[in-house]
C-alpha cells in the first residue's frame, strides 16, 4: 500500500489522558501532524472488559482511517494492553501501543531487576508488562499495583494536593516494600503526577514515562518505514482534536497541559463506526 508520508498520525485514548502522549509527539516530532480522538463519552476504559475495549478501539481506528492517517498510536495503556495485538492484524498502516516502549526502557534501566508497574485495574490485571519484560530478561521481577484514584485526581487538577500525596503514599507503600528500583508510569495520566510520585518513592527510583518513550519509538518507526513528514510544521491546522462527548471540557483540559492553544474540538458520533 502507498502511504502518504505527509498524512497525519492518528492518536487515540479513552479521553483526555492521551494528551500526555500527543504532547510528547508535538515536542519531539514537531513536523508531524496529529489527529487526536478522545473517547470522552465512554471513559474510563480501565475498569472495562477486554472485549469492550477491543470493540471501542476498532470503532476509533475506523474513524481514524477515514481521516487518512499514516500511522496509529494507541495512547491509552489499557487499550494498548487489551487491543493492540487484536487490531494489528486488521491494519495495513503501522500501529504502536505505549506498553512495549516503556517496558524496553525499564528493562534497560533496572539495576536490581525489580520493576514496578502502576496503571489501571485493566492494565495491571492484564499482566502485559510482565510478559514483555520477562521476554527481554527472564531475571526481572515485576510488581504491579493498580492506582485507580489517580485518574480522577489528575482530572480534578489536584496534581500536588495533600490529598493526592496521601493517596500516592497508600498506593505506593507496597512497591516501596518490594525494593523496586524502576517504576513504569503505566497510565496516560500518571506523567502529570510525576513529581508527587517521585517524592513518595524517593529519588533513587527511576520513573519511566511511556508517553515520552512512545514518541521516540514513533520517530524511529516512521524513519524506518520512510514515513517521516517532509512538511515544515507550519501548516494552518497541524493538530485536530475529536471527542465523543463534552468537547468544551476536553478543550479546557487540553489547554491546561499542551504547549499550544487548542482552538477547535469536534464532537463525533463514534457509535456509527
Ligand atoms: N487512558 C487510560 C489508560 O492509560 C486511563 C483512563 C481510563 O481508565 O480510561 O489506561
Image (cartoon, grey):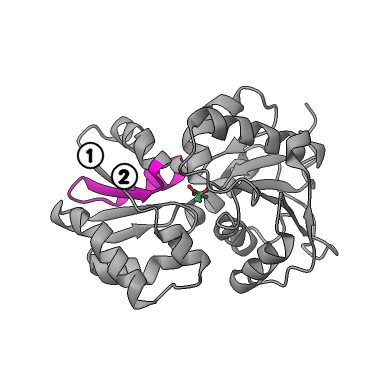
Please name whichever residue, 10 or 213, is drawn nearer the observer in this view of the structure. 10
Q: Which corner quadrant of the image does residue 17 belong to?
A: bottom right
Residue 212 position, x and y percent, is 50, 57
Task: Say if the magenta span includes residue 141.
Answer: no
* Quadrant that contains the C terminus: top right
Residue at 68 percent across and 40 percent down: it is 71
Residue at 72 percent across and 72 percent down: it is 261
Q: Contact, CB < 8 Å: mark 2 with mark 1?
A: yes
Please name whichever residue, 170 or 63, is drawn nearer the observer in this view of the structure. 170
Residue farthest to the right, as pictured: 236
Vertical side of 58 occupied by 242: above or below: below
198 to the left or right of 189: left
Residue that numbered label 1 is attached to: 140
Residue farthest to the top, as pictured: 89
What's drawn in magenta, residue-wise?
Answer: 100-121
265 to the left or right of 22: right
| Label 2 CA crowd tier, 10 Å (few <14, some 14–19, many 20+) | some
Q: Mark 2 to mark 1: distance in Å?
A: 8 Å
| Label 1 CA crowd tier, 10 Å (few <14, some 14–19, many 20+) | some
Residue that numbered label 2 is attached to: 107
Residue at 71 percent across and 49 percent down: it is 244
Residue 131 position, x and y percent, is 34, 31
Amino acid at each position: 500500500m502507498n502511504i502518504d508520508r505527509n498524512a497525519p498520525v492518528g492518536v487515540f485514548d479513552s479521553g483526555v489522558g492521551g494528551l500526555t502522549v500527543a504532547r510528547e509527539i508535538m515536542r519531539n516530532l514537531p513536523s508531524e501532524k496529529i489527529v487526536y480522538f478522545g473517547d470522552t463519552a465512554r471513559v474510563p476504559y480501565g475498569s472495562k472488559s477486554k472485549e469492550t475495549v477491543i470493540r471501542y478501539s476498532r470503532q476509533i481506528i475506523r474513524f481514524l482511517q477515514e481521516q487518512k492517517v499514516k500511522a496509529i498510536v494507541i495512547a491509552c495503556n489499557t487499550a494498548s494492553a487489551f487491543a493492540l495485538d487484536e487490531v494489528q492484524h486488521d491494519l495495513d498502516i503501522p500501529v504502536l501501543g505505549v506498553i512495549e516502549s516503556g517496558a524496553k526502557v525499564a528493562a534497560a534501566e533496572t539495576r536490581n531487576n525489580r520493576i514496578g508497574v502502576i496503571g489501571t485495574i485493566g492494565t495491571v490485571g492484564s499482566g502485559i508488562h510482565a510478559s514483555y519484560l520477562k521476554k527481554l530478561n527472564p531475571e526481572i521481577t515485576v510488581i504491579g499495583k493498580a492506582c485507580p484514584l489517580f485518574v480522577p485526581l489528575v482530572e480534578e487538577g489536584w496534581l500536588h494536593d495533600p490529598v493526592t500525596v496521601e493517596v500516592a503514599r497508600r498506593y505506593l507503600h507496597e512497591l516501596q516494600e518490594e525494593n523496586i528500583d524502576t517504576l513504569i508510569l503505566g497510565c496516560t495520566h500518571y506523567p502529570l503526577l510525576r513529581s508527587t510520585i517521585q517524592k513518595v518513592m524517593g529519588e533513587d527510583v527511576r520513573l519511566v514515562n511511556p508517553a515520552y518513550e512512545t514518541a521516540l519509538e514513533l520517530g524511529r518507526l516512521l524513519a524506518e518505514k520512510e514515513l517521516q513528514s517532509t512538511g515544515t510544521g507550519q501548516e494552518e491546522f497541524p493538530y485536530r482534536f475529536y471527542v465523543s462527548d463534552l468537547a468544551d471540557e476536553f478543550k479546557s483540559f487540553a489547554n491546561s497541559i499542551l504547549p499550544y492553544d487548542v482552538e477547535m474540538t469536534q464532537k463525533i458520533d463514534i457509535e456509527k463506526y
